[in-house]
Image (tube, grey):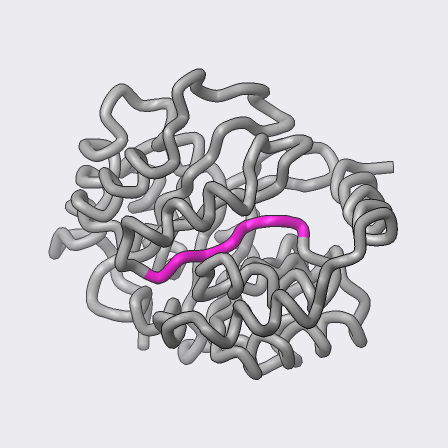
Amino acid sequence: MGFLTEIVAEVHAGLRAAPLDAAALRRRAVSQEPPLDLAGALEGDGIAVIAEVKRASPSAGPIVADADPVAKARAYAAAGAAAVSVLTEARHFAGSLHDLQAVREVVGLPLLRKDFLVDPGQIVEARAHGADAVLLIAAALADDVLVAMLAEAAALGMGVLLEAHGDADLDRALATDARVIGVNARDLRTMRVDRSVFERIAPGLPNHVVKVAESGVRGPHDLIRYASAGADAVLVGEGLVTKKSPREAVAELVTAGSHPATPRPVI
């Protein structure tokens, strides 16, 4: 059994043990300010950077002892990130909805809830805590559940980063109306990173879709490699939080993504 299968089973078990208060979450969700546009923030002339708040990971363990999500999110925004991603999964990534809410209070950029979401109620929960968009992993969701999740996000005016890991996922993603599709270079069964996955899959994405390269960005050279393969944006986690100055690390990526010599996707 791979990591993705295990964690999805854990999420389902958690929801059965502690069902979401759907009515209360929806009241809170609809009281929020209108969501910011993730897709719009990622479109443009340069290669956009989604900078991630991340405390730990299954592959790296605890990443930094003082991972203050508010301080990091402020640094990312000041350095020119287009959006901020917050990991809210607790058991394996040490994240929380409290982190999401805290970042919402200090950052005016589109905010992505990154987690292993399997139920439409979790999208309402994300909105209730200030998220403008959610990550959906195609491989974790049956077709009918994926349709329901996308519909819930649309009803709340939220964006979706729909993540694919292989050709089968890509076909399912393209069958939806998702504006933003990510290709994750990390195999969620083995946790290994293979940057060539994006290079192989990205050509199958149509030009009107915002293409996000996920995982494996350690610095500007990786951003440029992904840009050469057609990326419109990169999502960066460990490559930022492990740096002495996350602000400088984001600024380097933003500079590389806006440089005239950096390859641009064909539109």
Residue, x 36% and y 57% (percent of image)? 233
Q: Is residue 113 magenta?
A: yes
Q: Position of residue 121 (x, y in %)?
A: 69, 66
Residue, x 23% and y 25% (percent of image)? 245
Residue, x 45% and y 52% (percent of image)? 213
Depth check, front residue: 62 or 173: 62
Depth check, front residue: 215 or 267: 215
Question: Which quarter shows the C terminus?
Answer: bottom left
Above or below, 161 against 153 in this view is above
Q: Position of residue 84 (x, y in %)?
A: 36, 51
Above or below, 254 against 238 in this view is below
Instruction: Give the left or right position of residue 245, taking residue 52 as reference.
Output: left
Q: Is residue 219 magenta?
A: no
Depth check, front residue: 23 or 58: 23
Instruction: Give the left or right position of residue 77, taking residue 169 as reference.
Output: left
Question: Which quarter shows the N terminus?
Answer: top right
Q: Which residues are magenta?
A: 110-116
**Residue 171 in view, yes or no:** no
**Residue furthest top as drawn:** 65
Q: Position of residue 150 (x, y in %)?
A: 63, 75
**Residue 36 in view, yes or no:** yes
Q: Position of residue 52 (x, y in %)?
A: 41, 42
Residue, x 83% and y 51% (percent of image)? 12
